[in-house]
Structure formats: C-alpha cells, structure tokens
Amino acid sequence: MDDTHDRDQVPFPSERPAITSSNGSTPGPHTIYWKKPLIFFVCTVLTTLISGAIMEYPRINVVYLMFSYPSIILKGVPFSLSMLSILMAHEMGHYLYGRWYNVQTSLPYFLPSPLFILGFNPGTFGAVIVSRSPYPNRQALMDIGAAGPIAGFLVAIPIMAYSLTISRVDLIPDGPGGLYLGEPLIFQFLSYLVHGPLPENHTIYLGSVGVAAWFGCLVTMINLLPVGQLDGGHILYAFTGSNESARRLQKQLMLGSFLALAVLGLFSPGWWFFGVILIIMMRRFGGFKHPVPIDDHAPLPTHSKVLGLLAVIVLVLTFMPVPIDVDF
C-alpha cells in the first residue's frame, strides 16, 4: 500500500493501493458475478413499475387490471426510472470507489418489495453491495462509505426539482384520511425556489416522480445514521479510528441513534420497524462493532475528510423526524 503523504492528498492516487487479506494473502483477480444481481434488478424493475402505476391510479386495483390491460404497467415508468436512478447512483458510488481501492465487491443487489399490495410502497427495499475483502485503510473506508450517499443525493436533487415544477399547490383537504410526507430541508429549499411561500392551508401534491425523489432522500438519511456498517457507521469509524476513546464514542453514538429511533417511533411508528430490522441485520451481518481495516494507522487525507463532512451535510439536508404522517 502506497501511503506517502503527497499521494494521499488527492482523491485518486496514481497507483491503486494493494491490499492483503487478514491472513496475509493477496486476493485473487476481481471476479464479477452478474447473474444473481441481474435477476434481482429485473425483479425490482417489475415491482417498482407496479408501485409507480399504483401511484398514478390510487383508486384502481392496478394489480388486478394488469391481467386484462398489461400496458397499464407502463404508467409506472417515470417512478421506476427515477427511483432506480437514485439507487443506482448510490450503489455505483460505493462500487466504483471499491474497485479503485481493490476491495472485492459484488455488483449492486437491488431488493424488490412485494409490499405494494398493501398500499403506499416504493416497490423496493433499496439495494446493497457485498464486500468480499477487508478495507485497506480508513481512507478507503471513508471514500467508499461517503461516495454512495453523496452520489445518490446529487441525482435526487434534479429529480426532485423537476417534480416540483410539475406538481400542484392546492388546499389541504378537510377531514381525516390524509397521508403526509415529511419535508427534508432540501425539499423545503427547492420548494421555495419553485413555488415560493405557500398560501395558508395549502400544500404541495407530488406526482410519482416526486415521491421517488422523496424515497431517495429517505434511503440516504437512513444509510447515513452512525450505526454499525451502514454508510454512516463507515464514515464515523473512518473519522475516529479504533482506539479506546474512539470505540467508546462509536458505541455512544450507536446507542444514541437507537434511542432516537425509539423516541421518533412515538411520532412515526415506522422507525420502530426500521430499528428492529436494523438490529436483525447487524446481528446477522458482522455484529454491532465495526471491523478494523488492514491499516488502521494511516492518516486520513484532506479530501477524505471533506467527503465525510459533505456526507454529514447530506444527512442534515435529508433528515426527516417524521417521514410519514397519517391523519386518521
């Protein structure tokens, strides 16, 4: 691994860093397994198309009509394309930086969701990339961890801005039964630029493209929580390292995050569901303690610190204390 000071100061050093596995051996050539990721991707395209069509026709049983009018699924193309573009940008940010640092990673696995049959649902649980070799150092950990949410956020911004230009401003309906989406700071900023101050008792009615951008913000926010091996957990470890005080800080922030999820669940019960899923995933994949990279002592270069700070800003801009509120 080349960790000279000068080369560590640029995002892409002139030579890729070499890595070794935990037993001292060098990983073999990077083999790309594409069949399973392709199958998952095709399934996710289908489920997001159905979800998008349901959003276009919320009062019609789209799933039932598909058997008689298959072309109705094409109405879900705007949502599916927007949703998958944001997820793809996020995962390719991880993947390309992982390849650069010679970390053996899988292609993105897009996760289809059949929960569109229950109502409001994006048709996907997101996407994941599986790392098959350790990170060489904290620089790689930071760059790979931060690149995903930043890339996804940059794609979500123009999609959200466009969706606001085609959305309508209308009165908030009287009576119960309304479904209200949380408004992250980036949405409020873009909304003000496009529509200006909203009249009293008015709100913005988003189309399916806007809902896709909103889900993109939600996925980004969740991934940036400083927990375990989420992107936020990678970034936190890259900033702090593995000494005793750093480990104590990581543990405190993780416990604080779960406590925050428990409190936020009082206002939006979906946080409880996510917290339980997160605990199950952490117990299943690597535990609650972040693994140590091969070289844990190389200093974190300036560009990596900047990426980490940008990711923190993205978390602030996408954060929603109450993502979904149902007026019963």
Image: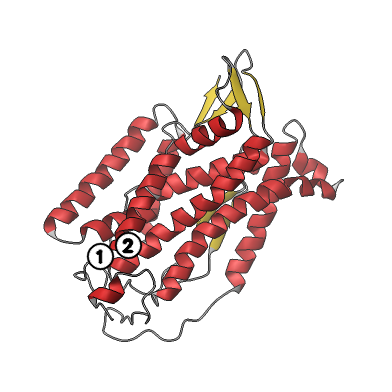
Q: Quadrant of the C terminus?
A: top right
Quadrant of res 307: bottom left
**Residue 200 at x, y = what percent?**
56, 14
Identified at 45% across, 41% down, the residue is 318
**Residue 170 at x, y = what percent?**
66, 21
Amino acid carrying label 1: it is Leu
Q: Quadrant of the N terminus?
A: bottom left
Do the residues under discs 2 and 1 have CB atoms within 8 angstroms?
yes
Judge left or right: residue 171 versus residue 263: right
**Residue 240 at x, y = what percent?**
21, 57
Q: How is the image coloured?
A: secondary structure
Rendered view: 208 above or below 311: above
Rendered view: 130 above or below 228: below
Rendered view: 157 above or below 265: below
Quadrant of res 35: bottom right
Asked whether the viewer can see residue 118, the reply is: no
Quadrant of res 146: bottom left
Residue count near mark 1 (Cα–Cα under 10 Å), binned few <14, some 14–19, many ≥20: many
Return the mark for residue 304: 2
Judge left or right: residue 52 versus residue 1: right
Q: Nearer the viewer, residue 14 or 122?
A: 14
Residue tagged 1: 300
**Residue 310 at x, y = what percent?**
37, 51
Amino acid carrying label 2: it is Ser
Identified at 37% across, 64% down, the residue is 143
Judge left or right: residue 211 versus residue 250: right
The residue furthest left is: 244
Residue count near mark 2 (Cα–Cα under 10 Å), binned few <14, some 14–19, many ≥20: many
Q: Nearer the viewer, residue 276 or 192?
A: 192
Return the mark for residue 327: none
How far apart are the alpha carbons under marks 2 and 1?
6 Å
Identified at 59% across, 42% down, the residue is 160
